[in-house]
Amino acid sequence: MRVLEIDHPLVAHKLTVLRDKTTHSSVFRQLADELVTLLAYEATRNVRVSPAEIETPVTAMTGTKLANPKPMVVPILRAGLGMLHGLTTLLPTAEVGFLGMVRNEETLEVTTYANRLPEDLTGRQCFVLDPMLATGHTLIASVNYLHERGARDITCVTLLSAPEGLKTLEAAIDSSVDLTVVTAAIDEKLNEKGYIVPGLGDAGDRLFGVV
Ligand code: URA
């Protein structure tokens, strides 16, 4: 598993405003969107391309275009939806599949409550969006789900990651999966409630309000 913690002043700035508890939901949403676009630039560094013959106004040349099949972007409901626009800004031709995962706040166990994905993901590059890699259980369940459908090239994009979650994820994922985690920051630890410290609180609630 490769872990890329993005070291960029704009990422650091936007993340600091996101962490601030006085940041209102509307600003939080806007900044999360901008931050994901910056992360997407790094996350798509190895996106598959193929040669393309074109003609410029001057001459014929061989350029580069995204290969087929197009990448699959998979936001994990609910909080991952807040990252979808930021990622598809750079990958507008990607297809989007959905996975609904819910975490039991007491046992921290994860169950799937919804999915809308192709049955066969063989040969598809997948970009999984989940803002908080905390215990790692949601991403383990999501990556395993995609792996069962044939995906072998999976990049998880997160705003924050906990060291404990990264370790658990790496240990749990089948070695046949080429797994990359792209994150704006690796924080200090998890607290006893499974929250990332210093973190930014509950990402879903901060994006969409408490339900
Ligand atoms: N999920 C969140 O939204 N925040 C955390 O700190 C951990 C998990």
Image (spheres, rainbow, N blue to C red):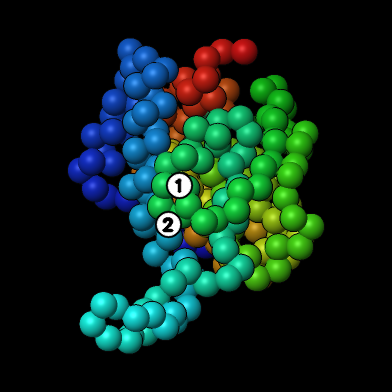
Residue 199 position in % (x across, y down): 41, 29
Disc nearer the start of the sequence (2/1): 2
Q: Residue at x 65, y 58 (%)?
A: 173
Residue identified by numbered label 1: 87
Q: Residue at x 52, y 15 (%)?
A: 209
Left or right relative to 20: residue 3: right
Which of the image's four quarters has the C terminus?
Answer: top right
Near-viewer residue (185 or 97): 97
Q: Secondary structure at mark 2?
A: helix
The answer to the question of whether label 2 and label 1 lie on touching residues, with beta carbons closer than 8 A, is yes
Q: Residue at x 70, y 36 (%)?
A: 100
Label 2: how many Cα within 10 Å (few below 14, some 14–19, many 20+) = many
What's the amino acid at mark 2? Answer: Ala
Where on the picture, by quarter, is residue 138? top right
Residue identified by numbered label 2: 43
**167 over 198 or under it: above or below:** below
Label 1: how many Cα within 10 Å (few below 14, some 14–19, many 20+) = many
In the picture as drawn, the residue positioned furthest to the front comes out as 57
Q: Secondary structure at mark 1?
A: helix
Left or right relative to 158: residue 145: right
